Image (spheres, grey):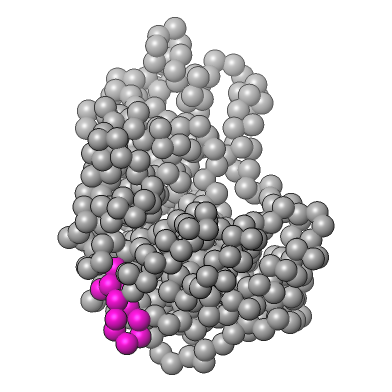
Amino acid sequence: MINYFNFKQFDNEYLLTNDFGKYMFVTKEELRSLIDNSVDFSSDFGRKAEENYFAFQCSKRAFADKAKHLMRESKSYLFQSTGLHIFVVTNSCNMQCVYCQAQNGNDHPHGMMDHKTAERAVDIALQSPNDYLSFEFQGGEPLSNFDTIKHIVEYTEAKNYTKQIEFNLVSNLTLLTEDTADYIKRHDIKVSTSIDGDMLVHNTNRQYRNGKGTFDDVVSGIELLRSKDVAVGAILTTTRQSLDHAKEIVDAYVSLGLTNVFIRPLTPLGCASNQWSDIGYTPEQFVTFYYECFDYIIDLNEQGVNIKEGTALLILPKILYGNPVNYMELRSPCGAGIGQLAYYYDGNVYTCDEGRMLSEMGDDSFLLGNVYHSTYNDLINNPSCKAACISSVLESLPECSSCVYNPFCGTCPVVNLAQNKNIFQKTAHSYRCKINAGIMDKIFNTLKSNNKQIIEKWV
């Protein structure tokens, strides 16, 4: 008997995947034997097909009993309650990035989360049955409201008796001071910042409101934190300016001692949506850029340089070891509500940070409630939370259910609504679909090449 699988041609071979995230590269003849249900289980191919759950000799019930733990493990995030809680402590920022998604380019009141609202948000987050929580501070620029961040940390530490909580700060670091760095170190707050490449690319994308570049100040912030033994991660947002500077961007990360280049495409929300004609690109252009970065990173690895690509690093554990991809945008269903919640400075609670961004554009479709009149159960039972879950189950979407990359991918209802006026992804080969497929093409091509051992070592 054969198990359900999807396939895609790779040159003279075919990539097969199944719902458990198992994969195989097979010849046309081997694929034909699966389709015809004529696998020779005494052959090397037959043994490998059975080992990876593409074919079986036992009864269907026995196969289901044998394989059910794999499905349970691959979807283990569904057995956990909301773990990521994002506190948007302000929408105010001292910078004006060309792709800002915290605002849409129009005038908005610059608000600060007060202590009472922060306490209410923490109280809701602590209602999550999950014993392992991540509290993430975002903005705007969250350091402009560091007083409330401190209050959240100390209020949480005073109220929490049972949960393991990790604090994370996402900051441009330009407002970092010695005292702030000391506090971050003392309370073991993890830090992530944005580095869009070398000075030229970064300063084109990320400027102060007076037009001055921010690269030197961000680097100074990284160095200050490192002097306190605080590790700093960084993320890259790709604009049209980035496309011709793949090597320079990777070299900038290496020179700064960063070991992970997370190459992210633009999300068409906020200012990025309004300025798409100036900073955007086609999926094919991004994939070409990604390949240039990836190939250069492989070359550096061969030279002994410790540098990895971040998106591949998220997906590879699932491909290689069956570990679930719990990155909110690459899971089915996505993490909206059931994986993350976003608490805005005014007390409004959204399914996710993207839902909050969409609200900045005037669409409150993903607003679940407010910290002053909602409980955790109210938020999770909100119809918008349920709709986000239903619309992001890849196994039920026509174009996704038959895709070979289904076990490793995800869809975002917020982006779908913003782009197509529908939370269901109904357009075949959309912007994010083409990008995700292109990235996974590269990963699987590498797994069948001589560079397989390099990316295996990343995980």
Residue at 30 percent of width and 53 percent of height: 255
- Magenta stretch: dominant secondary structure: loop
Where residue 125 sits: x, y (%)?
71, 65
Residue 212 colored in magenta in the image: yes
Q: Is residue 422 visible?
A: no
- Residue 109 vs residue 438, the one in the foreground: 109
Name of the residue lying farthest toward the left: 244
Name of the residue lying farthest toward the top: 42
Q: State which region is magenta.
A: 202-213
Apparent side of residue 350 relative to residue 12 in the rendered image (left or right): right
Where residue 271 sits: x, y (%)?
37, 79
Quadrant location of residue 385? bottom right
Q: How many numbered callouts? A: 0
- Residue 5 vs residue 25, the one in the foreground: 25
State whether residue 108 is above or below residue 214.
below
State the quadrant of the C terminus: top left
Quadrant location of residue 106? bottom left
Residue 415 colored in magenta in the image: no
Q: Is residue 207 visible?
A: yes
Where residue 313 sits: x, y (%)?
42, 44
Apparent side of residue 34 relative to residue 55 in the rendered image (left or right): left
Residue at 32 percent of width and 64 percent of height: 196
Apparent side of residue 357 relative to residue 371 in the rendered image (left or right): left
- Residue 434 vs residue 320, the one in the foreground: 320
Residue at 52 percent of width and 58 percent of height: 228
Where residue 105 sits: x, y (%)?
38, 86
Residue at 54 percent of width and 15 percent of height: 57
- Residue 280 vs residue 210, the one in the foreground: 210
